[in-house]
Image: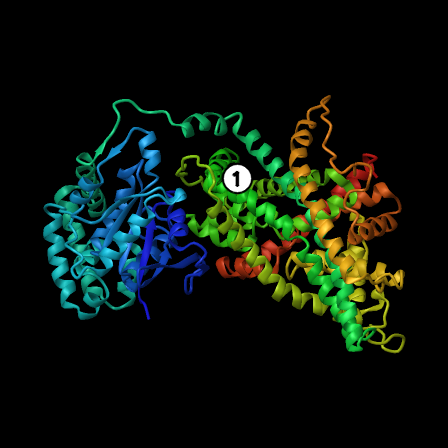
Amino acid sequence: MPLSFTIALAGNPNVGKSTIFNALTGTRQHVGNWPGKTVEKKEGTTRINDYEIVVVDLPGTYSLTAYSLEEVIARDFIVNEKPSMVVAVVDASNPERNLYLVAQLLELEVPVIVALNMSDVAHSRGLKIDAQELSKRLGGIPVVETIGNRSVGIDKLKRAIFELATREHPGIVPQIAYGDPLEAEIDALQAEIEQDELLSQTYHPRWLAIKLLEEDEDVTGRLAAGDHETVLLTARQAAQRILDCTGEDAETLIANRRYMFIGDVVSGAVVRPTTAVETRSDKIDKVVTHRVWGVPIFLLLMWILFQFTANVSTPLLDWIGGVVNGPITRWALAILDTLGVEGTWLAALVVDGIIAGVGGVLIFVPVLLFLYLAVAVLEDSGYMARAAFVMDRVMRLMGLHGKSFMPMMVGFGCTVPAVYATRALENEDDRKLTAFLTTFMSCGARLPVYVVFGAAFFGDKAGNLTFAMYVLGIATALFTGFVIKRIVYRNKPPQPFVLELPPYRLPTPTSVWLQVWENISEFLQKATTVILACSIVIWLLLALPINGDADSFNNVQPQDSVFGSLAGTIAPVFGPAGFDSWRTTGALISGFIAKEVVVGTMNQVYVGEAASSTPGEADKTNPFRDDVGEIVTGFGDAVILTAQEIVNIVPRTVNIIPGVHIPEADWLNQQEEKVGSSRLEGALVAAFERTAGSPDKGRLAAVAFNVFVLLYVPCMTAVAAMRQEFGTRWMAYQIVYTAGIAWLAAVIVYQGGLLLGLG
């Protein structure tokens, strides 16, 4: 049985800590939440010789003072869990700022290893760092140069971890000398703490004395709750004496001494160039973060991203849809026939419930794969931080700042972590407003709806619909923030905005893949739990007749079922928006559970209804060999068409310019064929045209439906997160507002389109 121990990774945001974590643990990692907290916890394992090492990736933080939840979590883990050591990841190109966290770690007297990460960036800027001298000036703690995204120095880091863990005496951690009168007060307070057995066992006495003199709110609050008023009184008196003696508060003096210590360490170990070196990142930022060009470049990248997501994924989406609705359905029917249950309610549950519901959602895995791939590339390259910087001026219109845009960017993936990501904001009002606005960021679960409607109604222009929905979400958030800030939070200026811009880097395949797999695996897990359960419940409600005398179980017209009756009762509300069908209303109701279920419900309702209107079609069988051949051939065509769609991003983007037309590639001569002719897409076109009365009105109603899906109440998990973070009243405001503005926007789109002659 191998020995095991735990190490913690600590560091400032954007220092490449995640790349070190990925390089150490690879795929042997999992993500959860800290116990009782809403901040993400990453934990993985690595093996060095016979040792099994648990690596805990602490939240990125600039210090261990309790200004944010992330700082409290990082500090509590080190203080309470007592890891065997802390690997402090330091940006080698900016050691002074990063070593402030290292100085605070040294005060905890925990074994520390410094990983000088991004050392290649430091060298490109002309910095020369003597790692041995730096180690010496830090009291002999190991210092290792690394380039995390290329796994350079990782083996050396592992050796340092192993040697420090197996060393009998980890060594003497240097103490920062705070000078008089601070040292005298620290010593006196430390002596009193040591007399309290509980305190001295829970905290390191000298560290606690320093924290109390800094008047750390979290620490003083815990001691007050633990009935340690005597120690707190002594600390307050000591802090007052320091203020009277020096004219400065203890917190400022302590911070100054730490920086003096860091300056002394750096002065003998780091040599800077005589003239500043303009790096490649600096040159790119002159354009990308430009006051004029920054926002258009951001919008252009978002346009390309959604063209990439909507159009490039379509061939693989159609292939998976064909496999699910073709061979897999036929194989399921053949197995059911062999078991003698074909035509029974069990067969209907399997085919119309599970396969139609879950399969209808799983076909969109390529869509999400390309979305998360594109986002991971942008994040790994360093652009995401620039997006927040560029959007800072836009966010100021709402009284917020660029840091609030980061949770919104997270919201493009999922609303739930976006709500929790607001914990990084210091101001409570900013947190509440930002969380309120994240619900308008179009999460990945809504994307399949745009894709299927875009392919059905707009063909190869499907990406335009997707892009329009994302832009509309951002615009609605800006409008909402502008109104709320001037009505609810008027006369409250925005907080200062400080953001670290990491250097531009070529994304690494390992890091990108780990991010993509983390999101896709979460979606697949949801498909096997929530979506499966919803599909079964929806099938059951479709099989239950509202009138037991006229129909029987599993032998009822969909509109006469419990599901159809409930949806039909609500449907007239959506008449002004052009989609007052019980089918669309039912999909919207199920979408409150999880937005992924919208497409699954439509697949069950529309495709199931179309199949029942053409009896015998689903019963057609093919030889197994023909089915396999169909799958293989279809996959080959899908790969070719996917590459074609990547190439066509360029002409579609350039063709936006009036008067410019570049022909698109058509490698398989399918230009004249209808794009996106899956069973669901065909059923949607027919149904919307029938309900609206004409093809143009049907297309307009489809756009209005997508607008409602974009803006209406997020999934129940996101609503629960909102309640957990901000209370029932704020959650209720959010539900009422999003439902109201979604209905109003859908009506404006449909009725406005009719007035403009678009219908």
Would you say 201 lies left or right of 554 here?
Answer: left
Find the residue positioned furthest to the front.
625
Indicate the quadrant where residue 163 lies.
bottom left
Which of the 4 image quadrants contains residue 714?
bottom right
Q: Nearer the viewer, residue 557 or 721?
A: 557
Q: Residue at point 56% right, 45% down?
A: 373
Q: Quadrant of the C terminus?
A: top right
Q: Which one is in front, 27 or 97?
A: 27
State the residue position of label 1.
Answer: 398
Percent from the top left, x then y, of residue 528? Answer: 62, 65
Instruction: Sort mark 1 into few (<14), some (14-19) or many (20+) by Cα contacts within 10 Å.
Output: many
Residue 345: image location, x then y, percent: 79, 75
Count the marks: 1
Q: What percent of the width, then of the height, locates residue 366?
A: 64, 50
601 on left or right of 221: right
Instruction: Look at the image and tell me whether residue 588 can be seen.
Output: no
Q: Residue 505: give x, y in percent of width and height.
A: 44, 36
**Amino acid at pointer 1:** Met
Question: Does residue 553 sit above or below 47 in this rendering?
Answer: below
